[in-house]
Image (spheres, rainbow, N blue to C red):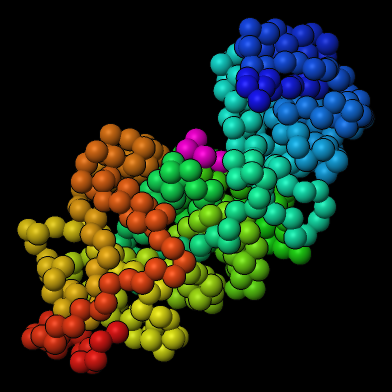
Amino acid sequence: MSEKKIHILIVDDLPETRENVRKLLQFEPEFEVIGQAGSGEQAIEMAQELSPDIILMDINMPGVDGIGASQTISELVPHSQIIIMSVQSDADYLRRAMLAGARDFLTKPFSGDELINAIRRVHAKRPAVAATKPGRGGSKAVDPGDNGQPPDEGKLIAVFSPKGGSGCTTISVNLAVSLANQGYRTLLIDGSLQFGDVAVMLNLKTITTLVDVVERINELDADFISSVVQVHNSGLHVLLAPPRPEMADVVTEEHMKTLLEMLRDLYNFVIIDTSSALNDVALTILDTSDRILLITQQNLPSLKNISRFFDLSNSLAYSPQKVWMIVNRATSKQGISVKDIENTLKRPVMVTIPSNDLVCNAAANEGIPVVSGPGQKQPVGLALLQLAERLGQEGRNTPVTDPVADDKKGLFGWLFGRPEAGG
């Protein structure tokens, strides 16, 4: 099993283009070009005959074009991963290619490094969903690293705050990237459907989104999910929010529940970045999730809303283990102390994430997560990594710390009007 070559099929109606691509690959010892096709029809035949690992597919060809050939090959030879090549680079082309089953997109002319890196990237993520049993419905992802067995049922983690601007997206993005870096099969969903920022914070193009899932909600399987998620360079899979605010209404609570339950079978962790508005979709996400990371800050407006959410969670019969309170932008220099927060709300603070706006803002502006850039060695980066490690180590039935039993109320407690009984 050592040094197995990556078998490649080149598809382009121009012989000189096929030859140029072959020459770009000839000096890479792990690559082997096993065939060349000059049309979409020939590509379909050769893909079935040769079962290549990677297909480099031109999009514009007479007869069956690259989109049509990719769609057919994705159904007949799901093992083969397709990289589309085109002089067109607009979003519509990208979206059509991804929905047809392409895993990456190269804009002509491309360099040898761009081509080689794309092949390596696509091949490296191939086990994510590609190695599935063929057929519709009920197919599960298989990771060869797990001896061909599907992963255990995954955990759904909702990151939520009832107060906007609390840093949910920063925590969601860094948590998801950290889990992916630890080797967990992880999907991040931008559940802030109107004004999601995940694409910006990960420097991803909005090609396919939740809207594409909704359009085929009755056809969900591993192969389709693979066609609509985008893959970050950390290996994290990402499902983005709709491209325009008015399209958020297309996603209903029934769609979200169906999708989340299906994703349990495909991923170890599904992280959902939620909006602060408790609409039907947000409540469905919270209800379905195994864990809610409840984000607060050390100020009265945030904590008043957190208190109200705990009242709501009690009425919804959420167990204490389900909700983890996390203090973001924590500081000892100002604001209400973490100990006072615990004593008054009768809930433990599971993690504190130190304040460092300089590092976090720079990461957001550059589209590089804190845990992937220079900030990973800073206290804020280490705290985010610690949160990911803690979730990664959690068993499905791991108990959490008992709620704080201190009965002190004082002025802070009076402001919140919490009952004396613990949560």
Depth check: give the residue in front, 252 or 273: 273
Classify 1 as above or below 223. Answer: above
Q: Quadrant of the N terminus?
A: top right
Classify 25 as above or below 218. Answer: above
Residue at the (20%, 79%) spot, across then down? 404
Magenta-drawn stretch contains 234: yes
Classify 8 as above or below 138. Answer: above
Classify 226 as above or below 34. Answer: below
The magenta stretch spans which residues?
Answer: 231-235
Residue 379, visible in the rendered structure: yes
Residue 245, visible in the rendered structure: no
Give the image location of residue 70, x and y in percent: 80, 36
* Res. 375 image quadrant: top left
Depth check: give the residue in front, 45 or 404: 404
Depth check: give the residue in front, 142 or 364: 142
Give the image location of residue 224, x and y in percent: 72, 51
Q: Quadrant of the C terminus?
A: bottom left
Residue at the (67%, 22%) spot, across then down? 4
Depth check: give the residue in front, 326 or 124: 124
Residue at the (30%, 62%) spot, across then down? 166
Left or right position of 311 against 196: left
Left or right position of 328 against 317: left
Magenta-drawn stretch contains 190: no
Residue at the (28%, 34%) spot, across then down? 374
Give the image location of residue 184, x and y in percent: 49, 48
